[in-house]
Amino acid sequence: MTAITGRCLSNNPAMKICIVSDSHDRGPMLAAAAGEAKALGAGAVLHCGDIIGPSTLKPLLELGLPIHVIHGNNFGDFTSISRMATESNGLLRYHGGDASIELAGKKIFLVHYPHYGRAVACTGDYDLVCYGHSHQPEVARQANIMGGATWLVNPGTVAGLGAPAATWILGDLANLTFEVRPVRMAAA
């Protein structure tokens, strides 16, 4: 396991977050989800992998929200994504294959694969484990070895590929509540 620890620019205990995954180069759909999340009070975006190219992330940088990204199984151009992160003055954080971060006092783990996410949730080391890959949204509590439960969240696919709908999750870290939301594209 290669976990990289990072802290968000905000320590707001009431922080809302936008959780997305599997954008597969569908930048406008990713931007629509993150834009709606920002309008609803989100203070950060967590992307659980399968971005593909850096151009997919450019509209997110324009929103001004901190973005935490892992690569998933469709790596795409991770060299350019790393360069973009370096040039973003800390706004974009590219963590590689997985990430251990803390936002609003909550320990969060990002990974792409469901089985890996479930395994990490079982440790009890995190309040929230986010994953993708299956393109199916899921919000569940996973029993852990500490005698408690860890939130396990899959936002589905923000691109809508191989799924009934394009989805993302609005999370509230103060209450640890998670709402699956459809991607709403602006009318052309």
Image (tube, rainbow, N blue to C red):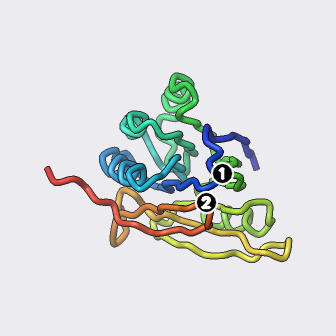
Q: Judging from the image, what secondary structure is the residue with disc 1 in?
A: loop
| Percent of width and height locating residue 7 | 68, 40
| Percent of width and height locating residue 115 | 65, 67
Identify the residue under disc 1: 104
The relative height of residue 88 versus residue 169 in the rendered view (above or below) is above
Tell me what residue is drawn at x 71 percent, y 62 percent: 127
Residue 10 visible within the image: yes
Mark number, residue 112: none
| Percent of width and height locating residue 148 | 79, 75
Total numbered labels placed on residues in the image: 2
CA neighbours of label 2 inside 10 A, class few (<14), some (14 to 19), many (20+): many
Q: Residue furthest left?
A: 188
The amino acid at mark 2 is: Leu
- Between 175 and 115, the one lying in front of the other is 175
- Between 82 and 102, the one lying in front of the other is 102
| Percent of width and height locating residue 112 | 58, 56
Q: Residue furthest right?
A: 146
In-image side of 106 versus 83 (left or right): right
- Between 4 and 65, the one lying in front of the other is 65
The relative height of residue 38 versus residue 169 in the rendered view (above or below) is above
Tell me what residue is drawn at x 58 percent, y 36 percent: 93
The amino acid at mark 1 is: Ala
Identify the residue under disc 2: 173
Q: Residue furthest top?
A: 87
Tell me what residue is drawn at x 14 percent, y 50 percent: 188
In-image side of 116 versus 58 (left or right): right
In-image side of 134 versus 122 (left or right): left
Who comes first in sequence, dot 2 or dot 1?
Answer: 1
